[in-house]
Image (tube, coloured by chain):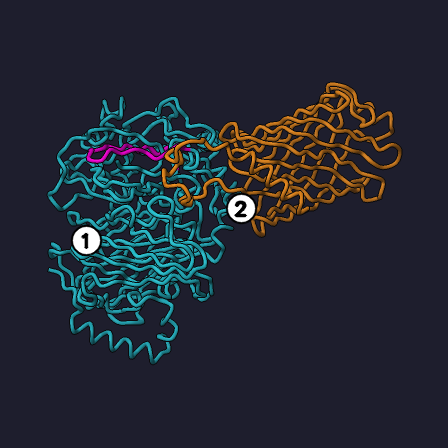
Chain colours: A orange, B cyan
Amino acid sequence: MKITARAVLIAVSLLAFELPVLGEETSTPSGAPPGWPDPIEDSGIHSLVLVDQLEYWGSDEQDALRWDLISWVGGDYHRLWIKTEGEVLTAGAGGELELFDLQYGRLIAPFWDLLVGAGYQRVWGPGSDPDHLYAVVGVQGLAPQWFEVDANLRLSEKGDLSADLEAEYDLLLTQRLVLQPRFETSLALQEVEEFGVGEGFNAVRLGARLRYEIRREFAPYIGVTWNRKLGDTADLAREEGEDVEDFSLIAGVRLWF
Amino acid sequence: MNSFPTPLDSLANRRQFLRYISATGLLATLDGLLPAWAREPAGLATGPAARAPGEPIDLFLRWQDLAFGGRRGRAITLNGTVPGPLLRLREGEDATIRVHNELGEDSSVHWHGILVPFEMDGVPGVSFPGIRAGETFTYRFPVRQSGTYWYHSHSGLQEQLGHYGPLIIDPAEPEPYRYDREYVVMLSDWTFENPYKVLAKLKKLSAYYNFQQRTVGDFFRDMSEDGLALTVKERLAWGNMRMSPTDIADITGYTYTYLVNGLAPGDNWTGLFAPGERVRLRLINAATMSYFNVRIPGLPMTVVQADGQDVQPVETDELQIAVAETFDVIVHPREDRAYTLFAEAMDRSGFGRGTLAPRPGMTAPVPGLRERPLRTMVDMGMDMSAMGSMRGMEMGGGKMPSGAADHGDHPGQMTGMAMGEGEQACVPGMTPCTGPEVGRHGPDTHGPGNTSVARVQRDRLGEPGTGLEQVGHRVLVYTDLRRLADDFDERPADREMELHLTGNMERYMWSFDGKKFSEVQGPIKFNYGERLRLTMVNDTMMEHPIHLHGMWMELENGHGRRIPRKHTISVKPAERLSVLIAVDAPGRWAFHCHLLYHMDMGMFRVVRVS
């Protein structure tokens, strides 16, 4: 963990600072003699680890523990991002690392980062445990009307192309009680049978979480979620004897540091 | 005539008071926590006679545990107190101030608003390398001005930790107003959090400290008042900009304790007066991030100085003091009763409070916090004619003189057109009033470090500050300020320069022209000897108190030869204003937003005069 953090910091430091212009010292922002300190430090390294979801899903079928974590470290223009999302079935029947992305992000517009990197995906449980690596490019930011948007295009090592989109919104009921509706969908250009993914739009997930910010950094919540598999993906699920639709009650905690 | 040496009667009062507080044990509480000048209930005793001209002053910087509102915090003290000691200099003397840095880290002292040789200005990395841990730096400069000023650290976020104090320069010639007693009223904001943690939080979540955001309940209330269509339209307009109209202050009463002379509201700093006396209050806003709306219910205030410079006296009931500004006011309490000095944080998340009273221990009612203000579409610099009628937009469009909207080349002339001499720009308590359009934004949106531009730029010098538009009493506005001295530099401007105040609130990036300090290639160049007109356009939706070191900015507020000199000018959202500068001080000078965290995040430049 420590080594990772340091490596990340070094990598990002290299990315965050453009190469200084060589030559006369008057080309420094202050024009001060060499060796003097900077009058201000406006390009320090900052970071965020946001555990957006850490929650328990209870449904008629199988209960699960889910996580959704977004983190970054870096400066204002250049950042290193790590995102992961997945679930573990509580009955011990397996789980899924839906994504683990490591990306470089650059501020390309006032509210938008362009992210490029690589990721890893894996399903485990009874039967085979398929996994794959993929390259990912995405945009993340704040859309008009305060929608937090995260859209990605993924190309797996086997050449399969897929896209996904997440959007969420914070509706303030009070200063600390926040209702967060969330929409997710994904689309595959090819069938990826071992992941149970069919061609076309393959799933939609709608959720609503009601959190109470005891502190900004710590907010327990309850919520509901509705998932529906679509198209070929739904057909694949039916063949396996799985449900194509489920509804879950959620309890969890959102935290960041 | 003023009367600096403390009158005998107030000396007697002071002895009585000291006896009283010793008896109640109060003295033990206050002693050691406060500088002598703030403990002096009968007014400032340190007259010019207390120190021989030129006699050196020693300042010791130390870390110390101090109580603020009953809770202990770790502060940087100057000679053992927060704020630091009152430095009282005399115009014409050669000041020698030795700063002993016992902090264990680099530090500095900057003399805010004082015209000094640039090597003595105290900005690390600009005027000198800073004062290293354990070292002493001796500041030496001729004192060429008079008035109320202050001093503070220019290193990192040290100012947030208590590193500031008042500085008064007594004039060589008597001042043209009369008073019997005087007090320093130094306002500031204190947090028990580590300032670097505060900054880190803002970087992660810039609305962290805002607990006054609009909720679903507000939506329904607005809907019942304005109707559904208008409310939705207004919400969509804000949503489109991805900005919050509740963004008045980045850091709020959620973490801040607002201090008057180092005392929390409950500790009630008190200044004594005898009914019928004229009392001069030297208001200094030493806060890092907080604008204050200051009033003394029941007592009109006569403003006689702004930023240490005499102005034609103007009476008002409330004034907004931007970060780093000073105002000297004279009050004339005739009744034998206490008055509350109420310094409401502009976002109304808290307040600083003190009392003026004939006898110690007296208090007056403390007003409640008024409803939090909201930003308007004018603040956003939106084109209102294109938007139609909307909440917060029903503003005095009739005030717009025709022909003022086509260009912004000569804002000084335009303000003159907009407001004749002596005309009150706004009628308080009436409809909100908005200044005329004086410019439009060009196509450059200043890059990803900037989120919005002021498409419509207004002359807002005659407008009351945020939250004071409809308070129902007189409010000081910048067009009220007229310099007293007849010493205007008649030369026309040799050169014009335009600078935009920019930022990205989501990232908590702050800048000029979309570039943080670290992104520029070198200093801004001023030519020695020139007369420069600097136009500033605020593309953000917050006020920024812009401070130039080493030279005055003469604010073109329409008063011709009487335009006021200032060291710090609060530029309102979507405002376009201009200042004249006599470029007469060679060297490197800092130029920055005086909101400490904005400065530190890049809203900073070096000006090189050569």
- What's the residue at 25%, 47% (across, down)? B117
- Magenta stretch: includes residue B100: no
The region drawn magenta spans B520-541
Image quadrant where residue B403 sits: top left
Query: Does residue B217 appear in the picture of this structure?
Result: no
Image coordinates for residue A139, horizontal then vertical, percent: 59, 28
Which residue is pictured at 45% across the width and 56% down the height?
Answer: B105
| A63 left or right, relative to B125 | right
Q: CA distance from mark 2 to mark 1?
A: 50 Å
Is residue B525 found inside the magenta-colored segment of the image? yes
Q: Which residue matches tag 2?
A: A174
Q: What chain does badge 1 belong to?
A: B
- Secondary structure beneath dot 1 equals loop
Label number found at residue B146: 1
Q: Is residue B260 above or below residue B503?
A: below
- Report the disc number at residue B542: none
Residue B132 lies, in percent from the top left, at 41, 55
User: Which residue type carries mark 1?
Assistant: Ser
Quadrant housing residue B383: top left
Question: In this orientation, which residue lies closer to the viewer: A43 or B179?
Answer: A43
Q: Chain of mark 2?
A: A
Q: Is residue B545 left or right of residue B252?
A: left
Packing grade of label 1 (10 A; few <14, some 14-19, many >=20) is: many
Q: Relative to the observer, which residue lies in front, B597 or B389? A: B597
Q: Amino acid at mark 2?
A: Thr
Asked whether the residues under marks 2 and 1 belong to the same chain, the reply is no
**Badge 2 density bin: few <14, some 14–19, many ≥20, Cα 10 Å:** some
Badge 2 marks a residue whose secondary structure is: loop
Q: Residue at x 45, y 66 (%)?
A: B65
Q: Residue A141: horizontal and vertical position, in percent?
A: 56, 31
Percent position of residue A194, x then y? 83, 26
